[in-house]
Amino acid sequence: MSDHERPLAERGRLDAAAAGRKLADTGVAFGLALCSTAVRTRETWKLAVHEFPKRPKTVYEERIYEASPGELIALLNETPDDAQNVLLIGHNPGVQGLADILAGASEGDARERMTRRGFPAAAFAVLTFSGPWKSLEPGTATLADYWAPTE
């Protein structure tokens, strides 16, 4: 089967639910989720979102699969300005590169942990940003938190 059609392994299913719980614990109310169309990201999202108090609007986006950080920024630049707290469910190396490039600043040891751990399956970074989505560019966000299943 192709990489795009590859399902989650059992470990991935457990980690996806744990990531959902940890994301819910942040208290962030996500208004929009942009999810890759790959089978494993859709499965990850379905398992994670069950842990949320409220399900955000979900858009399955083909352009996330194998996207570079620049392509992901371009996609986020298209986000309507009324969309607050957007969650992107994607793939490495694009997602880790995106978090690293966007984060002009970091809170606590989040950047050190992200650099050390990388982005294993189900890992996430929480970035904060003020302004319209079309102005999102490298260095304009703050890395507020990072979590990986082995944290």
Image (tube, rainbow, N blue to C red):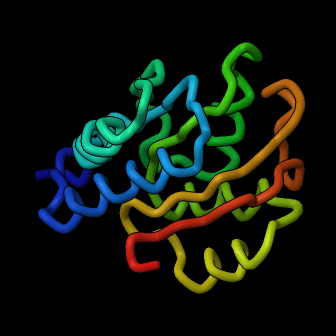
The residue that appears at 10% across and 52% down in the rendered structure is 1
Image quadrant where residue 87 sits: top right
11 up-or-down from 124: above or below = below
Front one among 28 and 134: 28
Residue 69 image position (x, y, % from top left) = 65, 52
Q: Left or right? Give the position of 19 relative to 77.
A: left
Front one among 18 and 111: 18
Q: Left or right? Give the position of 137 relative to 57.
A: right
The residue that appears at 89% across and 29% down in the rendered structure is 131
Looking at the image, the residue that sits furthest to the bottom is 116
State how many labels appear: 0
80 up-or-down from 25: above or below = above
Front one among 22 and 39: 22
Q: Left or right? Give the position of 19 relative to 141.
A: left
The residue that appears at 18% across and 56% down in the rendered structure is 8
133 up-or-down from 125: above or below = above
The residue that appears at 67% across and 19% down in the rendered structure is 83
Residue 94 image position (x, y, % from top left) = 56, 56
Residue 70 image position (x, y, % from top left) = 70, 47
Q: Left or right? Give the position of 77 relative to 38.
A: right
Residue 107 image position (x, y, % from top left) = 80, 67
